[in-house]
Amino acid sequence: NETATLRAVLDDLQANFVLEGEIHWDAVALALYVPPARSWKNKFGKEFTLDMLGDELIEREPGDLYCAGTHRLNSLTILMRVDAETTVLSPRVRKRVREHLTRVAQILTREQLPDGSWQTDWHYSLSGQERDAFSPAGNVTSGILVTGHHVEWLMLLPDEMRPPDRVFARAAQWLLDALSKQSEDKQWVEQWYCPASHAARAVK
């Protein structure tokens, strides 16, 4: 078995980094380990900055294929929190990230479903669309996936940007009830373990 240091893993990530595809977890690693530097180069000599990372994440489709757009928001939130401790973003990008996350948090507060969950259509009004123009899509599984992920990143926001406590309480109660019911089905747990673990972590 081969072993590698964290430094070697980060070097490999930087060397092979591109701004295409699912970069969300790459973005988290880069935000956490690149500072206090603000930039790096890949193996082709192309330079990237944490500003570029922030802009790219904001400009992507709000409901992308990766867990209904929630991974993108988690990455942006971590980038913002890192920047609050060690300045790595320009004033322009810092302002843009905060405004974007604040807007999404406000939309989620306003459009939380009566049962306390969010579904995969949560992002429609972020694009200027009305939810009632679409089917209310979704089921318990998609609700667990989306609601669990949203609660995770919303809890990372600073107090002045977070939704009211009642929003978290309603979401947590829905998740707890849904997970309790779904956990009786072992096949479901095996198939949906990843989103279920996010949801359980959010409830905890």
Image (spheres, rainbow, N blue to C red):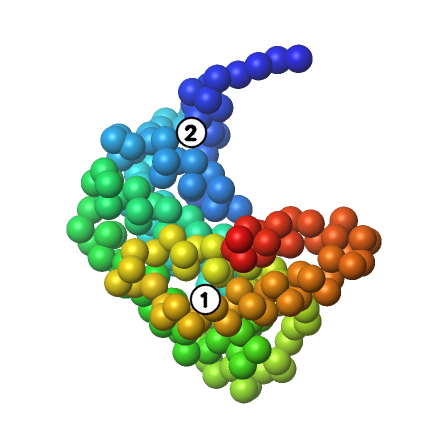
Task: Using the image as rendered, state which of residue 151 and residue 86 is in the foreground.
Answer: 151
The residue that mark 2 highlights is: 14
Q: Earlier in the sequence, mark 2 or mark 1?
A: 2
Q: Quadrant of the rendered structure where residue 19 is?
A: top left
Residue 93 rendering spot, x and y as whole percentages: 25, 52
Position of residue 122 measured from the top left corner of the image (x, y, whole percent): 51, 71
Q: Which residue is mark 1?
A: 168
Residue type for callout 2:
Gln
- In front here: 149 or 26? 149
| Camera sees residue 48 | yes
Q: Is residue 7 above or below residue 123?
A: above
Which kind of residue does numbered mark 1 sit on?
Answer: Phe
Q: Residue 8 location, x and y as percent?
A: 46, 19
Does dot 2 land on a helix, a strand or a loop?
A: helix
Residue depicted at x 66% and y 13%: 1
Q: Which mark is residue 123?
A: none
Q: Is residue 65 visible?
A: no
**Quick one: which residue is furthest to the bottom in this view?**
132
Q: Is residue 76 left or right of residue 138?
A: left
Taking 19 as reference, is 50 left or right? left
How far separated are the C-alphas under marks 2 and 1? 36 Å
Residue at image x 61%, y 80%?
Answer: 136
Residue 15 figure quarter: top left
Relative to 12, say whether 130 is above or below: below
- Callout 1 secondary element: helix
